[in-house]
Amino acid sequence: MKFILFLAALIIIFLLAYIVSNNKREIKLKPIIIMLVLQLLLSFLLLNTEFGLVIIRGISTLFDHLLSYAAEGINFVFGGIANEGAGPFFLNVLLPIVFISVLIGIAQYIKVLPIIIRYLGLVLSKINGLGKLESYNAVASAVFGQSEVFISVKKQLPYIPEHRLYTLCTSAMSTVSASILGAYMTMIEPKYVITALVLNLFGGFIIANIINPYTVSPEEDIIEVQEGGKQTFFEMLGEYILDGFKVAIIVAAMLIGFVALIGMINQVFASIFGISFQVALGYVFAPLAFVIGVPASEVVKAGTIMATKLLSNEFVAMIDLGKISTSLSNRTVGIISVFLVSFANFSSIGIIAGAVKGLNEKQGNVVARFGIKLLYGATLVSLLTAAVTGIML
């Protein structure tokens, strides 16, 4: 049954992408098939093999150590604020982002990270049917995040045509930044975080190849990375520490606003219609939850979490998933967990458009114009990742 559902999910997801395609005649099937096979192989490796288990445990252990180191700095500054045995979300989940950001800055400073990103991008460009710049950007997005990544292509940004810009933005919205992986791992199982991170990379290329197919000429296909002015080591540390803290504060502020707003809407909606707004949306998303492999008895609960993520952000949805996870099967928890690991939500349209506009106003306006289509594509990426995961659970 799950194989039939998986085939149905592929047909529906690809059809939804095909309907809004810019150039249906230019869709290249070969790279789509290759990347779908890679998704299946990688998901099987990560979720169902001893080797994959070793990889997941290794990454999980690494982040456990990093979070424990981060806790030393947090406890030094905020020790005594929390009650004995308490674990405030801001202290335990968000503030470790500061330390992870510092490590990324160090890897960037000693030139390890740029080399990894560049050559991974070159390898990906051989199989995804797109350009080197798109491949570089996808890998860089998974490290720097959806807004910061555009700084690395600042020099090229004014000259990137709209069709290529859409693909760059889809990659940015479909992935998540390395600095918040540790935060996710405190909320959902690490194996689902890593699986989603890998699958989303290829999923972004698959959906982009359907919605936005094109061919890049060798003359256009040049990677020029913005290095910026030379900083001293301690200037870099200060910059990345502050950047990490800004991210933590921004996420905290968004959570306060979104959780409060959803609470108010639910209360008003329930008083009028007898059910909460989130549950009502759960019924809308239930068919999608079913087709990606969620058992029929749990589709409304799963659909509610999916809708929450789209309307607010992945943190709010992960919190809600944690509250009801004991009432769901392991299969449903796994499928919905990987669906949540991306930046595909309405607020990300503003974040990406604002980031690009800060670097180039004209291109920022272009991004704002295709913002809904961008979210549409990134959501299909999350559905594809969830469907591929569902066939392996």
Image: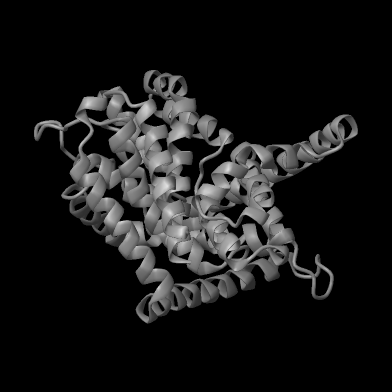
Report x, y in % for residue 134.
27, 40
- From this view, report whether residue 389 is shown above or below residue 60: above
Q: Horizontally, is 118 left or right of 393 in the view?
A: left
- From this view, report whether residue 379 is shown above or below residue 34: above
Q: Nearer the viewer, residue 376 or 314?
A: 376
Report x, y in % for residue 281.
68, 37
In the rendered image, the residue lying farthest to the left is 218
- From this view, report whether residue 35 is shown above or below residue 79: above
Query: Where is residue 297, by image quadrant?
Result: bottom right
Report x, y in % for residue 232.
37, 55
Q: Horizontally, is 369 left or right of 264 in the view?
A: left
Q: Residue at x 53, y 58 (%)?
A: 335
Task: Kindly tell me whether residue 389 is visible in this rendering.
Answer: no
Report x, y in % for residue 50.
38, 81
Query: Where is residue 91, by image quadrant?
Result: bottom right
Q: Residue at x 61, y 40 (%)?
A: 285
Q: Horizontally, is 249 left or right of 83 in the view?
A: left
Q: Nearer the viewer, residue 212 or 27?
A: 27
- From this view, report whether residue 111 is shown above or below residue 223: below
Q: Nearer the viewer, residue 61 or 377?
A: 377
Q: Residue at x 63, y 73 (%)?
A: 72
